Image (cartoon, coloured by chain):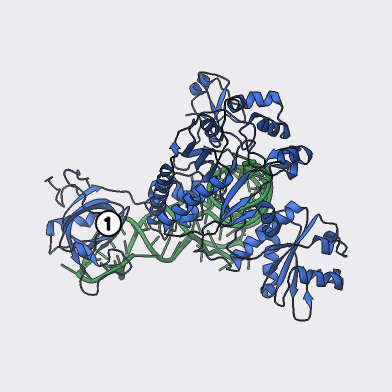
Chain colours: A blue, B green
Amino acid sequence: MDPILSADEAPRAADPLGDWRRTHTCSKLTAADIGAEVCIMGWVQFRRDHGGLIFVDLRDREGLTQVVFSPDHAPAAHARAHVVRSEYVLAIRGTVRPRPEGMANPNMVTGEIEVVVNDWKLLNTAKTPPFTIEDRIDAGEALRLKYRYLDLRRPKLAQNFILRSKAAQSVRRYLDSLGFLEVETPMLTKSTPEGARDFLVPSRVNQGEFFALPQSPQLFKQLLMVAGMERYYQIVKCFRDEDLRADRQPEFTQIDIEMSFVDEEQVMGMAETMIRTLFSECLNKELPTPFPRMTYDDAMRDYGLDKPDVRFDLKLTDVSDIVRGCELRVFAKAELVKGLRVPGGETMTRKEIDELTEFVKIYGAQGLAWIKIRENEWQSPIAKFFSDAERSALAERLELKVGDIVFFQAGASDMVNNALGYLRVQLGERLGLIDESVFAPLWVTDFPLLEYSPEDKRWVAKHHPFTSPKDGHLEVLKSDPGAALARAYDLVLNGSEIGGGSIRNHTLDKQSAMFEALGIDAQEAEEKFSFLLNALQYGAPPHGGIAFGLDRLIMLMAGAKSIRDVIAFPKTQKATCLMTEAPSAVASKQLRELGIKLRESAAKESQ
RNA sequence: GCGGGAGUAGUUCAGUUGGUUAGAACGCUGGCCUGUCACGUCAGAGGUCGCGGGUUCAAGUCCCGUCUCUCGCGCCA
């Protein structure tokens, strides 16, 4: 056995691990282990030094165990233990024993027992951490991101990564059992015109030219289908240089899947079972069979959004036709007028309504009209503008009852749907209509193939330009581009889009027609996508697939508020890493090798 | 690019109408303490009030600019 330093000689020098081996993790000791000689290793969570007895809660990835240094039991070991501080790394050899009568701690998994120390090693000391490592956090996120390796020691965060690992394994097991091949695709690839901004990587050997990091492996997985792989998957990083949100990071992970010889029913069925298996294996939650479905048009009509949160019941109602002739001009001339009836909402205060009005303004609304339905009157700033006929039509259409409040939004249809759709979600949260223990999956289908971009003044792909139109919709595409439907589907969970996919164009003529509709001429298509167009001419099988946002999925499963809580080393909202301080300036030699010169406004001091 | 919130001790925060030496809790250091479990107790140390200007006899506090973190809008096929 290794010699152990005595208390008076260099008490803070670390001991070598030597031949000590861990026998148990800190969560695994129970009353069944009483009497056992064990060796546990971990970090000091709390120290309670009574001068006599010293208690230490030792933490490892799995949990906490109380360790007791006793002057009666092992005087030498006890004498050295006064130097122990928070986050010191200890190896403990001791005996599991029951806590004295009445001293059990019901709040701890291992609260029945404690380990009385026979001998111990100080494996390392630690500076006082800048914040306390416990779930009851009191430090700001910026500080925690700088010391991410300390934040990750918190049990709650550690649990998220245990869940994430189990989830990835569950998905791999499932897909492997169905004959999917895990194939890696390039990280250094070609910049594509459509979609998000690319992260670019300069090439030293090809100066003046750039790789792009993949926004997704979309084209590669299609080419793997042409290559006859038949079933592909990958749990893979994707990169998009767009602004961040609580649920968006510039690099994120997809479960990427593609299959040959299938239609949308087979892809959705496979994906649905994968998600159901995942929830069953990792959370012990049974999701409905089958998942409910809704068309895009129905989602927009009833919920205003293409990702309805169906955990609660409020719905939007179109009343445009009823108010077309009313005296309230903003209603009468609006492209779309919708109402949102809130049962029992009549008790809402002026202040609450004002807050909701501010809320909808975020989405471009000018204001928020409302009517409180009382026994003998409609209390409302706008009720006077409606005729008796209009009132009774509204009451009937909206199924108004005494005690309700109904909110209206009028104007451009995109704005009305967006503002009322998010107002609905806001009300669901504020009024406690959401059961947080429920997971409500929903397929949204029959998406439009294209949407009009006012900014670019042209039609752009809603899903992506490789999505196949529904049967017969290739013709619709030419006559009425906005009406053409896609063989695309999204999976929505609790109001978040967690996955989406489509059946692809596997023939050259269909893909060419799609490019044409998008205003990509033959020459540009050739430049950007010749490899795909070539491949489609060599016997591409019918194929389709789906991709899930793993981070967002784990975030929902873990009940985390931010995607950062399920990514080991995330970026801040300005896409920087507070721990490594990336991105950073580089030496001018590096830039010279790449043939890159910075514009003066962008140049920063290099190291 | 735009809007909201935040920035004061190691941490989380308080700080009145601009007015004495900027406070509290936790943490930290030292003493005491043999059944604690966010131990207790006594004592102590600890401040570029994000940064830069300005107004003023006097600025944590008022004004202008700027940076960072965060939530959202736009953006994200």
Residue A96 visible to an observer of this rendering: yes
Pick the front one: A481 or B39: A481
Rendered image quadrant of residue B6: bottom right
Please provide percent x and percent y for residue A368. Answer: 74, 63
Q: Is residue A18 placed above or below B24 in the rendered structure? A: above
Please provide percent x and percent y for residue A179. Answer: 43, 40
Please provide percent x and percent y for residue B60. Answer: 56, 55
Name the amino acid type tagged 1.
Answer: Cys
Report the number of discs: 1
Rendered image quadrant of residue A194: top right
Residue at the spot 52% in from the left edge and 46% down from the top edge: A549
Return the chain for callout 1: A
Q: Is residue A232 left or right of residue A194?
A: left
Q: Is residue A47 placed above or below A191 in the rendered structure? A: below
Q: Is residue A14 placed above or below A232 in the rendered structure? A: below
Residue at the spot 57% in from the left edge and 29% down from the top edge: A603
Pick the front one: A443 or A456: A443
Q: Is residue A196 placed above or below A174 in the rendered structure? A: above
Pick the front one: A484 or B20: A484
Residue A552 visible to an observer of this rendering: no
Please provide percent x and percent y for residue A488. Answer: 62, 44
Question: Mark 1 falls on what kind of element?
Answer: loop
Give the labeled residue for mark 1: A26
